[in-house]
Amino acid sequence: MELNKVFVGRQPILNRGKKIFGYELLFRNSVVSDADVLNNIKATATVIVNTLNNIGLKRLIGEKKGFINVDAEILESGILDLLPKENLVLEILETVELTNNIVELCKKLRINGYQLALDDFIYCEPLSPAMRTANYIKIDLPMYNRQSLTRVVGQLKSYPVKLLAEKVETKEDFDLCYALGFDFFQGYFFAKPSVVTAKSLSPAQLVLIELSRALSREDEFYTIEALFKKNPELNYKLLKFMNSAAFYATEKITSVRQSLALLGYRNLQKWVTLLLFAGEGGDSRLSPLLERAALRGRIMELLAKKITNDPVIADSAFMTGALSMIDSLLEMSITNILSEFNLSQDINNALINREGFLGKLIIIIELLEQERFNLIHEMLSEYAVTLEDLFSMEINAIVEFEATGTNVM
């Protein structure tokens, strides 16, 4: 039997500090049908193993936890012994009947060093043996009202497990689960945070905006260098970045002027954009919003390059994708934020109204995050690009992100 090529997406899992703790790994194939793409749980164990080993679990998730869906067939097959266990969590699907045989298999996996999660768990006393084998229990929020959720959390507190809330879609969801003592959270609540108080731009951010303007105008290098000289911390960050593995230079960087010459206007503007997002002391690999911004930028850059073969448009696509999360990051309206930048009208139209070619690329990336593959297929067909192409770009962006961390701070 010929197997479909399988790709891997991922959805962040956050800790109580809203930092990324791990990812649920989402298996995808290039078949257009939503059912075929989303029901990858039935993909054979061989496909799962090959996917993880070909890409590399470490390359996908770094040092974080990776949650992988498994069903009864996979549990009973014995092939899980082939998978790396250090950062792996086997997420047992709600469709698995927790028989005595399955529970015994779970116990053996725990003894062998694997971590286990019970997915979409519904509490009942006869399942006590299964709960005692699990490291994590995932609670699907839409299945509960506030009263029943409070009750089930109280019942689970007597077991040695960490609680993970799934489908946390709003700040109210997060606040409730946080108050109830959940350890981890999964969902898109962080994508559109409710604005309690508008954030003002810090002095450091204002300097970065000034620098971004100068770069977009392609001011003389001595003008840009002067901004670095007036801000020693920024100078230090650039040198640190240029001397890190994130930038593939064959020679060590010894001056800002040398850095500017090697990076050039476009790459430097990309770096400034990511630096603006990271905030003071921030690690991009721990921030779900910054991660999504960085991945959007890179995927859109790759997509634009494939469609147009124009490096200038590809650079604009990166900038547009990276900036597409800035209203959520700064908790300000997008029009107010963009008034501080000197961006092209094409980028502004894409960010504000999703107009033009760049606007279409944002829509495609947003649909990718929502796993609405049929709509993506329709949009990509206009450019002779396949879902498989897009999934490959997503994988490349994820691997690059984990490799460099885009940790510009």
Image (cartoon, helix red, strand yellow):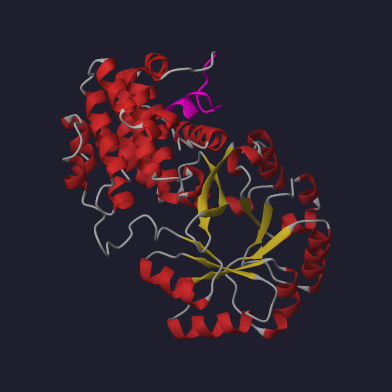
User: Is 233 displayed left or right of 136 in the figure?
Assistant: left
Magenta stretch, residue numbers: 238-250
Q: Residue 397, relative to residue 135: is it above or below? A: above
Choose between 300 and 241: the one closer to the eye: 241
Give the percent coordinates (x, y) of residue 395: 52, 36
Residue at (76, 73) in percent of width and height: 99
Q: Is residue 244 magenta?
A: yes
Q: Is residue 179 magenta?
A: no
Q: Quadrant of the C terminus?
A: top left
Q: Quadrant of the N terminus?
A: top right
Give the percent coordinates (x, y) of residue 300: 37, 33
Main secondary-structure element of the magenta-colored stretch: loop
Choose between 157 and 26: the one closer to the eye: 157
User: Is 199 displayed left or right of 305 in the figure?
Assistant: left
The reply to whether residue 205 is in sight is: yes
Q: Residue 39, relative to residue 403: is it above or below? A: below
Give the percent coordinates (x, y) of residue 51: 64, 39
User: Is 114 displayed left or right of 210 in the figure?
Assistant: right
Choose between 388 and 341: the one closer to the eye: 341
